[in-house]
């Protein structure tokens, strides 16, 4: 079993490819580094909202100020309570397709399978806004109007996306643009 590792201040990248019977399976994991404060604040925000709402309902004093309090508590809980993602995985099975997995800290896992026959080409996109520039990895699919993002919740750096992109290109028998690859290598070396 081969293991490739890369680290960032926010994410870690792990590449597992099996030798032997499961040789055709590649697993790429982007994991969020554990922050107990983030998890605690996420759940405590929801608890504060529920407590404030139940307190006002039990007292049955619903007036303008209590409605205002509920709205403030709800907006605070919404800001603090996000769906904390533990990791996102890409399981590449060249004979069958690609499975995209999102693992949450709560234990919930969301999986999506894309058959290999439906994938036209994997692409690396540079997303530019007036303030930031980030990279995303997406798939162009047959009979789909929009790109399908590989990492939907996380925004890993380009140096973690390039190995996944190369494996997807190899699995779909699509030759990556050499100029595009050189540009990505140059940009990841700068960071």
Image (spheres, rainbow, N blue to C red):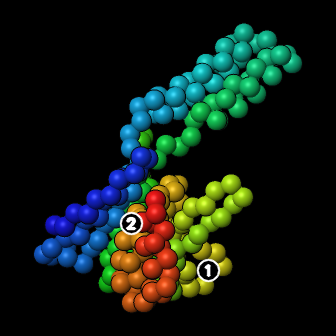
Q: Mark 2 points at which residue?
A: 90
Image position, residue 124 (x, y; %): 52, 74
Q: Is mark 2 on a helix, strand or loop?
A: strand
Query: Considering the numbered disc 1 on the image, is that residue within a helix, a strand or a loop?
Result: loop
Residue at image position (53%, 25%) is: 44
At 51% across and 57% down in the image, what residue appears? 155
Q: Where is residue 178 in the image (x, y as percent from the top left)?
A: 45, 87
Residue 173 as seen in the image, left or right of residue 55: left
Circle 2 or circle 1, nearest the eye: 2
Residues at marks 2 and 1 touching, judged by CB atoms closer than 8 Å: no
Is 119 placed above or below 37 here? below
Position of 106 relative to 155 (above/below) = above
Q: Name the residue under label 1.
A: 144
Left or right of 56 on screen, residue 38: left
Earlier-in-chain disc, 2 versus 1 = 2
Measured from the top left, where is residue 45 in percent x and y?
Answer: 58, 27
Locate residue 180 relative to residue 1 in the image: left or right.
right
Look at 64% across and 35% down and name the residue there: 79
The answer to which image quadrant residue 132 occupies is bottom right
Numbered disc total: 2
Q: How far apart are marks 2 and 1 (CA)?
A: 20 Å
Quarter of the picture containing the N terminus is bottom left
Is 95 rendered above or below residue 91? below
Q: In the figure, 75 relative to 166: above or below? A: above
Q: Neighbour class for label 1 at 10 Å: few (<14), some, many (≥20)? A: few
Quadrant of the image occupied by residue 96: bottom left
Q: Is 108 or 133 nearer to us in this picture? A: 133
Q: Residue 62 carries which label?
A: none
Instruction: Kindly indicate the quadrant of the structure image that contains residue 60.
Output: top right
Residue occupying the far left of the picture: 20
* Residue 166 visible to an observer of this rendering: yes
């Amino acid at each position: 079993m081969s293991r490739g590792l890369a680290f960032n201040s926010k994410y870690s990248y792990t590449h597992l490819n099996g030798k032997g019977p499961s040789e055709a399976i590649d697993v790429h994991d982007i994991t969020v580094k554990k922050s107990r404060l983030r998890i605690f604040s996420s759940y405590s925000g929801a608890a504060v909202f529920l407590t404030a709402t139940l307190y006002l309902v039990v007292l049955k004093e619903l007036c303008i100020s209590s409605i205002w309090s509920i709205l403030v508590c709800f907006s605070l809980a919404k800001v603090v309570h996000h769906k904390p993602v533990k990791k996102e995985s890409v399981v590449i099975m060249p004979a069958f397709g690609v499975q995209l997995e999102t693992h949450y800290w709560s234990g919930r896992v969301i999986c999506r399978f894309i058959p290999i026959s439906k994938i036209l080409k994997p692409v690396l996109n540079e997303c530019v806004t007036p303030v930031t520039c980030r990279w995303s990895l997406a798939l162009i699919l047959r009979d789909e109007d929009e790109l399908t993002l590989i990492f939907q919740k996380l925004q890993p750096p380009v140096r973690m996306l390039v190995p996944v992109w190369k494996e997807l290109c190899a699995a779909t028998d699509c030759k990556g643009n050499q100029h595009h690859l050189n540009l990505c290598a140059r940009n990841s070396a700068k960071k």
